[in-house]
Image: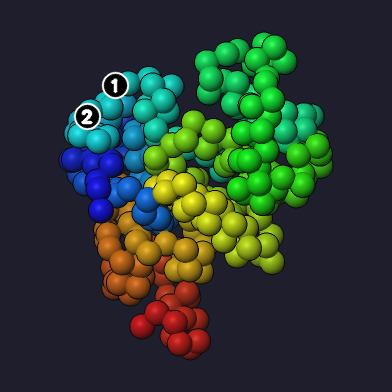
Amino acid sequence: MTVILETRALKRTFGAVVAAHNINIQIHAGEVMGVIGSNGAGKTTFVNMVTGYLPPSSGEILYHGDSVVGLPTRDITRKGICRSFQIPQLFAELTVIDNMLIALTIANGARPALMRRAVTPELEERAMALLDRFGIAHHAQREVGVLAQGVRKLVDIAMATVAEPQLLFLDEPTSGVSADEKMDFMGTLIAALKSTQTAVLFIEHDMEIVETFSPRVVAFYEGTILADGPTAEVLANDKVREFVIGGEFHRKSETEGGVH
């Protein structure tokens, strides 16, 4: 597969504190990758560096072979690297379709205040097509503030795809979604993104979600990469078991015939 993003010896320090060190990752076109690690392990620092929210102290970030270090976030987004946050960034008092139209208007270079003037039938059609891709078109005329958390997250992620990214970072996509809805939510999400061959890197603490939806996993620990590879291998890694996951998940998996 084609490598679309590569980091080399990526490092970030805050004074004497090393938040990330020697981060070497390759991300391929269209792949789905889970990122695991405890709070403070360096996961979000890595994502912030790649998406332009935080400059690296040293190292390289190459997107299609070109450096993106030092570029403003908006320019990185235009190149095709986008992110969705743990807490949806939505206008709760507006309808779902209006939120989508605002995102599309901004992606087209217009100011949100001029949205009504910028909206065309073609733009509305595109907004509805995006909502349909994520299985939420029937919510188009509802106010975002009344929606269940899972639906709100799908709206937020749909908005993040208006720029047609080749690489999308998701920060704990199932956070706040009820246990009964997590699997369906994640299935809808991954199917929608796979349909456009979008590469996905998602940070997640739910090991069942990771095991089900990510063929590849990267485990962070104390600012470094502890393991990177096929999910079953990483989750069975002794160091990952000890330092990242702990024994509880694996005891359950072995009892049920899961990861060995």
- Secondary structure at numbered mark 1: loop
Examine the image and state in which quarter residue 180 appears.
Answer: bottom right
Which amino acid type corresponds to the residue marked 2 in the rendered image?
Asp
Which amino acid type corresponds to the residue marked 1 in the rendered image?
Gly
Kindly tell me whether residue 90 is visible in this rendering. no
Q: Which circle marks residue 15 in the picture?
A: none
At x 47%, y 35%, the residue is 164
At x 28%, y 63%, the residue is 229
Mark 2 packing: few (<14 Cα in 10 Å), some, or many (20+)? few
At x 64%, y 27%, the residue is 122
Tell whether 250 sits left or right of 129: left
Tell whether 53 sits left or right of 181: left
Tell whether 171 sits left or right of 2: right
Count of marks placed on residues? 2
Q: Which circle marks residue 70 in the picture?
A: 1
Direction front: furthest residue: 122
Seen in the picture, residue 46 relative to 217 is either above or below; the reply is: above
Examine the image and state in which quarter residue 260 appears.
Answer: bottom left
In the rendered image, residue 41, in percent from the top left (x then y), is placed at 37, 49
Give the CA distance from mark 2 to mark 1.
12 Å
In the rendered image, residue 21, in percent from the top left (x then y), is placed at 23, 43
Tell whether label 1 touches label 2 (CB within 8 Å): no
Residue underneath mark 2: 66
Kindly tell me whether residue 230 is visible in this rendering. yes
In the rendered image, residue 77, in percent from the top left (x then y), is placed at 42, 28
- Of 242 and 226, nearer the camera is 226
In the rendered image, residue 216, in percent from the top left (x then y), is placed at 34, 61
Tell whether 87 sits left or right of 216: right
